[in-house]
Amino acid sequence: MAIQIRPYTEEFSGPVAEFNRRVGPAHVPFRIPETPVPSWLPKVGGRNIYQEIFLAIEDGCVRGAYTFKHQQFSFWGRVLEVGACQMPISEGVVDKRYSLVGPKIVNDALRRQPLSYGLGLGSLDAAITRMLLAMGWSVRAVPFFFRVRNGFRFLRNIRYLKTTVLRRCVLATAAYSGFGWIGARIAWPLVAPVAEQPRSVCAEQVDEFSTWADDIWKTCKYWYSMVGVRDSDVLNILYPPGNPRFIRLKILNNGKPAGWAVLLDTVMSDSKYFGNMRVGSIADCLALPEDADKVISVASQVLEKRGVDLILSNQSHASWGRALSRAGFVEGPSNYLFVTSEPLTELLNDIDPASKGIHLNRGDGDGPIHL
Amino acid sequence: MLHDGDLASEIHRLLAEKLFVELDSPDVDLLQAGVLDSLALIQLLLHLEQQFGIKIAVDELEIDDFRTITSIARLVASQKTACADVGVRNGVQR
């Protein structure tokens, strides 16, 4: 029984459908797409950012798969190719005879690009995280920040807190007794004063990124130990013009572009975590670290004015984390993990031993469905 | 040098002590029995490398190499031979 890993081609659409049926009982959160061209970031023309899907094949049967995102990152200004191993899945989840497929998938990704990472993954206890750690990868959590804007709706809807009957009752009572606001503020220190933004800073909503974003990129790339290339070409691929889901902000300071942010405003419907809340997120952003306050403050105000109940953001860089705190955000437990291959870990240890200069957020993850 | 039987006993002991897997016979199908998931497999590989001073390339492995203690012993024996051959070649080059 020889497992071979090869690019996904049309002839395997049928075996992929059969694989998806076989792993169904394991309730994995995703499936292998039944067409070989990824719906997000397909390989088109000379793009530097694209995805490919690889399959683990045994005698014509699909036994696993992963999506590999090719992307350029800047390391203090030095641009290198980096790979992201996304959505790995193996038949080992339902049949331990295929337990070797997972490690083979990871090895294949490493062979294609030694500087590889994974982002998201779920938790330190997840099987994939534990396997990667056993294979010598390193893990860091990308801090998670939130700010409650509507205490009543927050208390009524937040689900991950409702893990016991007692907690459910307390939260429901707080919400309906009119103490929703107070409850939320007692539970989280939201009474902290929010830093005021100078009047010189404002936001302009734009339909696409253009040369002004290139100028920001050219300046900022030297200020981060690791940051995904975010020139206008890449930004317009990640957040395509015409897609109304993305709120693109150009942040101006004294009339000059100082940074940008990409926001989402999503009305949840019976979401596992957020119930029926209206959730705003600061999904992606860039500016000089010293200008992080300006971007976060203005981006939060835009989401507030739209009427969101809750604002979320994952930010790895200390300056962005501080900016969120100053804007009234609270840090919560993060399950957004950044795992790095041994070569990438070594590179980061060489150039930034404390990992303070890494700028990662939801924009570096596995696509709009998880933003 | 360890013989096949000694190797199998060593691997049996390693599985019990490091991975807490107790087996009645060296020919129990580890995969059928469901005792080796992908994490346990990687941990076993690391322990084998450490214990026997060998290097095992995941790319070259087949799942049958891990089916029983006997097949793992065969894998370790072949890797020990391969490592010894490389050592001899390097010695000659020097």
Image (spheres, rainbow, N blue to C red):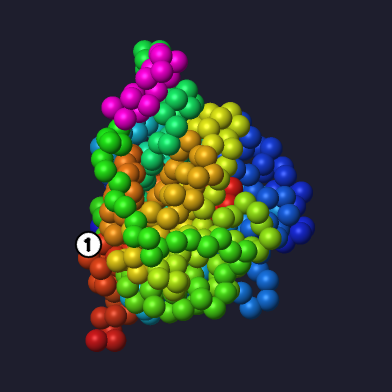
Q: Is residue A362 left or right of residue A76?
A: right
Q: Can residue A151 be seen from the camera position used here?
A: yes
Q: Is residue A213 above or below residue A205?
A: below
Task: Indicate yes or no whether the magenta region holds residue B63.
Answer: no
Residue found at the very far bottom of the displayed protein: B94
Badge 1, how many Cα within 10 Å: few under 14, some, many 20+?
A: few
Task: Please tell me which residue lies in front, A259 or A307.
Answer: A307
Q: Is residue B33 above or below residue B46?
A: above
Residue at left 37%, top 20%? A179
The secondary structure that dominates the magenta segment is helix
Residue beneath disc 1: A354
Q: Is residue A185 above or below residue A171?
A: below
Task: Indicate yes or no whether the magenta region holds residue A174.
Answer: yes
Q: Can residue B30 be seen from the camera position used here?
A: no
Q: Is residue B76 above or below residue A287?
A: above
List x then y, in percent, for residue A246: 59, 55
List x then y, in percent, for residue A123: 39, 41
Residue A30 in which image quadrant: top right
Residue found at the very far front of the displayed protein: A199
Residue at left 64%, top 78%? A46
Q: Which residues make up the magenta segment?
A: A172-187
Task: Please tell me which residue lies in front, B5 or B48.
Answer: B48
Task: Please tell me which residue lies in front, A263 or B22.
Answer: A263
List x then y, in percent, for residue A5: 59, 60
Q: Is residue A303 left or right of residue A20?
A: left
Task: Please tell me which residue lies in front, A249 or A358.
Answer: A249
Q: Is residue B40 left or right of residue A275?
A: left
Q: Chain of mark 1?
A: A
